[in-house]
Amino acid sequence: MIEIIELSKYYGTKQVLSNINMTFLEGNVYGIVGENGAGKTTLFRCIAGLEYYEGKINARLSPLKNHLGLLLTEPYLFSKITGKEYIQLLCNAREIKIGDIDLKNIFELPLNQYASTYSTGMKKKLAITAILLQENTYFILDEPFNGVDIQSNIIITEIIHKLRELNKIVIISSHIFSTLSDTCDEIHLLKNGVFIKTVKKEEFTQLETEMKEMTVGNKIEKLELK
Ligand code: ADP
């Protein structure tokens, strides 16, 4: 379990998250949606212990960050290390013996090349591989589907299903609604740093329709496309 109690976050005088209360349970996949700037990444960074915040974040396994696989939108990769060394480094940090990395290279990455030379999608796949091999219990995946090819999207979707089966907690953000409806048990709508709505699986279609109406409205007609 991860429990967030009265979490608030300010950058200077600007409040980015306001009194967030939320409980994430094992064996569930949670989607966080919201417009750019809603506070998703800040929330993830708070959970990961990368930011100071007001309020409390408790987890069954403590310290939370030692059991968390965090995939950032643009993973940071050190220069002059190969893909293989990156994976090894992350696994060493958890004292995990992974054996033959090449056998676990499911995204078929050029693991002997410097990771800094990888494309955006390849970097993301490398970071995903590493946090999976770290045997984490909690996963936060900030836009895992963005910038990777369609084959990898299919693999990532299946990985998320497997993580649920393994009783992990998975929290993901995505701007592609179908990826969330395929993977999540619940979707939480974040607006201006506040959770304004929680939607269960059976109401996903209704949420998609509502979001479409809210965001598209009559904008397309305004273009007077001919
Ligand atoms: P999202 O991930 O939903 O797009 P973010 O969490 O990145 O939103 O950003 C939420 C708000 O916090 C935005 O208004 C953004 O400009 C602001 N913000 C994010 N990081 C910083 C920072 N390091 N310093 C100041 N403001 C920030």
Image (tube, grey):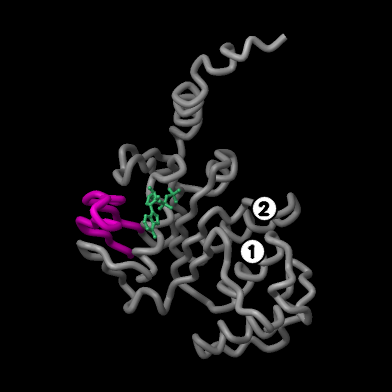
State the residue at coordinates (43%, 62%): 169
**Residue 98 falls left or right of residue 30:** right
Q: Quadrant of residue 120?
A: bottom right
**Percent x, y of residue 156:** 64, 57
- Viewer-side residue, 9 vs 100: 9
Mark 1 belongs to which amino acid? Lys
Q: CA distance from mark 2 to mark 1?
A: 8 Å
Question: Which residue is denoted by mark 2 in the rendering?
Answer: 147
Question: Which residue is denoted by mark 1 in the rendering?
Answer: 124
Confirm or reject: label 1 Cβ below 8 Å from ligand 1: no
Question: How many dots with numbers?
Answer: 2
Q: Decide: is 86 above or below 221.
A: below
State the residue at coordinates (57%, 56%): 161
State the residue at coordinates (45%, 40%): 35
Cβ–Cβ below 8 Å for labels 2 and 1? Answer: yes
**Percent x, y of residue 185:** 45, 47
Q: Decide: is 43 above or below 112.
A: above
Q: Main secondary structure of the magenta part?
A: strand
Residue 121 colored magenta? no
- Viewer-side residue, 17 vs 153: 17
Q: Earlier in the sequence, mark 2 or mark 1?
A: 1
State the residue at coordinates (57%, 70%): 76
**Residue 206 falls left or right of residue 12:** right
Report crowding for label 1: few under 14, some 14 to 19, many 20 or more residues within 10 A (C-alpha): many
**Percent x, y of residue 70:** 49, 67
Mark 2 belongs to which amino acid? Gly
Magenta stretch? 1-24
